[in-house]
Image (tube, coloured by chain):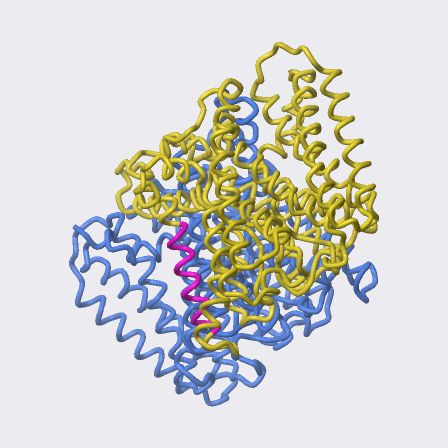
Chain colours: A blue, B yellow
Amino acid sequence: MHFRLIGNVLGALILFVGLAMLLPLGVSLIYAEGDAKALLISLSITTLSGLILYGLTRGSTKEIGNKDGFAIVALGWICACLFGSLPYLFSGSLGSFVDCYFESASGFTTTGATVITFIERLPHGILFWRSLTHWLGGMGIILLSLAILPFLGIGGMQLYKAEVPGPVVDKLAPRVRETARTLWKVYVGLSALEATFLLMGGMGWFEALCHTFGTMATGGFSTKSTSIGFYRSAYFEIVIIFFMLVAGANFSLHYQFLKGKFSVFWRSAEFRFYMMVIMICITLVTINLRLDFHYNLSESLRYASFQVSSIVTTTGYTTADFGSWPSFSQYLLLILMFVGGCAGSTGGSIKCLRNLLLLKQGYRELYRHIHPRAVVPIKLGGKVVPPGVMESIWGFFLLYIFFFVAASIIMAILGLDLVSAIASVAASLGNIGPGLGLVGPANNYAHIPFIGKWVLVFCMLLGRLEIYTVIILLVPEFWRK
Amino acid sequence: MHFRLIGNVLGALILFVGLAMLLPLGVSLIYAEGDAKALLISLSITTLSGLILYGLTRGSTKEIGNKDGFAIVALGWICACLFGSLPYLFSGSLGSFVDCYFESASGFTTTGATVITFIERLPHGILFWRSLTHWLGGMGIILLSLAILPFLGIGGMQLYKAEVPGPVVDKLAPRVRETARTLWKVYVGLSALEATFLLMGGMGWFEALCHTFGTMATGGFSTKSTSIGFYRSAYFEIVIIFFMLVAGANFSLHYQFLKGKFSVFWRSAEFRFYMMVIMICITLVTINLRLDFHYNLSESLRYASFQVSSIVTTTGYTTADFGSWPSFSQYLLLILMFVGGCAGSTGGSIKCLRNLLLLKQGYRELYRHIHPRAVVPIKLGGKVVPPGVMESIWGFFLLYIFFFVAASIIMAILGLDLVSAIASVAASLGNIGPGLGLVGPANNYAHIPFIGKWVLVFCMLLGRLEIYTVIILLVPEFWRK
């Protein structure tokens, strides 16, 4: 472990978070609702802390090692969430520190779960910061999942190299910057495109930006209490569905597509699986809503398309209170919370790639019991998946289920009913946002007990950082020389 | 596939089921409640069908192969359930054929879920048959899990050979009979012991036998609507807890113990895990009931001990309506439905052995991310678990979760609320019996829609026969030459 080096990177990161506060500061000056002071204080504290840490730890000439990578990723997100909570704290928008940290973590982890009941009462500067944390978090995730995790060998993430020969590095430090630059261009470009579409539809620039941030990061914070449902606009829903699906797909594919390889989406086994899951589930929910709910066919299709896309991509925007839908639709959405977007997207949860490979292994084991002596490798896109990668995916899946069960048990201890306990953890661990029951789309997380909020914050970080990265810091073995 | 041979074994099995009906026939003659005729007809049809099939397929000199083994196991249980449903059908005790088959399958799979609301109204002969199906099913399971499944390489079952060098065969046909004879002696002996204890406590011989059948098979059918809670007797509860725990432990261990190796329980990693899970969960539920429910400390401990033991061993007897307990206790019991007894017991579900190895792999993967180049084998009781066995366990776990999700989705489509949909499938797949919500201990499965009952029957068979055995018959590959 090179503590000096870790401190240096963290210092730079905190400085960056601080400088990002200039944007909401600008917004708050335009709207002049009295939140500028809070943002200025937050900005000063954050940039100064970043500068001091950066300055004190300068001059490390060490290479970033494996362990340093884990520490930087986990501590980086924890620090970003901490400093990101300052604007809420100083503006008095939220009651307690835990609420501020919850909202900030929900932002940076692109979850979108909120403790704010009356969103429209918050000043514009604070709301802009709230949505911006999504977008920054999404930016971090692209870097993390396409450049850092494959290097650390986390849960099958190294498969990109086989699946998508995109801009993926083989060594951590030297080419991270280059990968980041390329992919962020795609991210910024797609964001600009979405904002333009929303503006063209007549959405104000403030709301268009905030909803773009929430979409592209698969976050889900809205500037309206009733989320996208507020607009009652098919146009906005179609635009947002499209960009949610884009944000939930592997950014390497977008990069390849822009390079002119138009068949790249169709050739990706994971992308096909992702679209197939979405199409099937939209169909099922549409039928269920049409038959067992008061929607007509076009309403059923419209609400089903939006909600399925929103949950699979782990965005969490809503156009209807799906908590009042028939139990089949609710249950299907709950299960989709465990599917998630593609690997290399801003989407969270277990991810399509892993689910696909797990299903393949399940079938493979069946086959092996028929032909005990046959050697049947698991393939993805025609290439054999190495056993070590499969084991890593198994490990990930198991830890995911383990933490889901453990955290939901704690939520039940705190007195939540079964459905709310299960859904709150599924929605936090999968970085979705709204769950079911008491944390459904018609409610929020404000009423969750103090300890429960910290548990869910931990789940958001666990899920967002692919579990290993957070939990590995808690294993004593990690700290041994 | 040797169809003649399969038919021959099935014929013998059906004949055996038919002859077993002599016992309830005797009971019905003693009580003279008008069910003797129905039992006699059932007995005649069953024995005759068995004899004819046996006679027609005589003279096969082939060895039993892998595929034949799968077909015999799956078809054997399906046939037993079918002929076992005749007494319900002919006595008019149950309304429809699906109800009769459900009750019979619930018996032979040692699940204990019932569609009967007023159990006390049924004649004694029918009730005796109902409980006897448990006991016969339990006998079949011991044979299956200790002699047949290891041979077929199902989901880690071959681990006995490493873990318990007991009376386990290496080849299917020749020594199955010997293994069966030895283990059944243990099974019969333990059953006799429990019945004696229950009789000593003042239970009538009929109820003592029925409850012994339900306990030793980890079944859960009672002769009372309120299950063991009817007796309000701490003595009966202690006896039944003890024998539930015995029935949920590996029968190879009992065999070894009786041979004088008294340390065998303590030396088994799986048994230690099993007892640890039970102890921890009893403590947690006791605390939860004491703090958040109206029980005093001794009541809390008493009800928690019984219910946790009953669910972990997958028996399903109840002494209280745990559906009204605080949500934490309910949720913990729901999760325990996925733990199950030890491998090689009459208990169902995923089983302690597999859960233990899965947790070990989860931790191993964490360790591997810290030391990427280290080779860390997974060990059980000091011995390395071969990678192929781990893959088989993974496959089992995945298929278990897959069928759980798929079946509970169907239950939700049929209109069950979320908790009931989840719990009904968890309780059927894990061969427990009572679930939560509308299928909780205060209710039963009578109100489940027609299709739902067949889905749950399928789940009971899937769970009982370790998934592979049933599902493999549905894979087209299985039927190719």
| Residue at x-position 47% and y-position 85% | A93
Tell me how many marks there are.
0
Q: Does the magenta portion include B275?
A: yes
The image position of residue B73, as x and y in percent, is: 61, 30
Q: Quick check: B273 left or right of B372?
A: right
Secondary structure of the magenta portion, mostly? helix
Viewer-proximal residue among B74 and A259 = B74
Viewer-proximal residue among B215 and B112 = B215
The image position of residue A221, as x and y in percent, is: 55, 70
Compared to B143, does A58 lie above or below? below
The image position of residue A112, as x and y in percent, is: 52, 68
Q: Which residues are magenta?
A: B274-289
Viewer-proximal residue among A445 and A173 = A445
| Residue at x-position 41% and y-position 65% | B283
Viewer-proximal residue among B95 and A304 = B95
Q: Which corner quadrant of the image does residue A432 belong to?
A: bottom right
Compared to B442, does B297 lie above or below? below
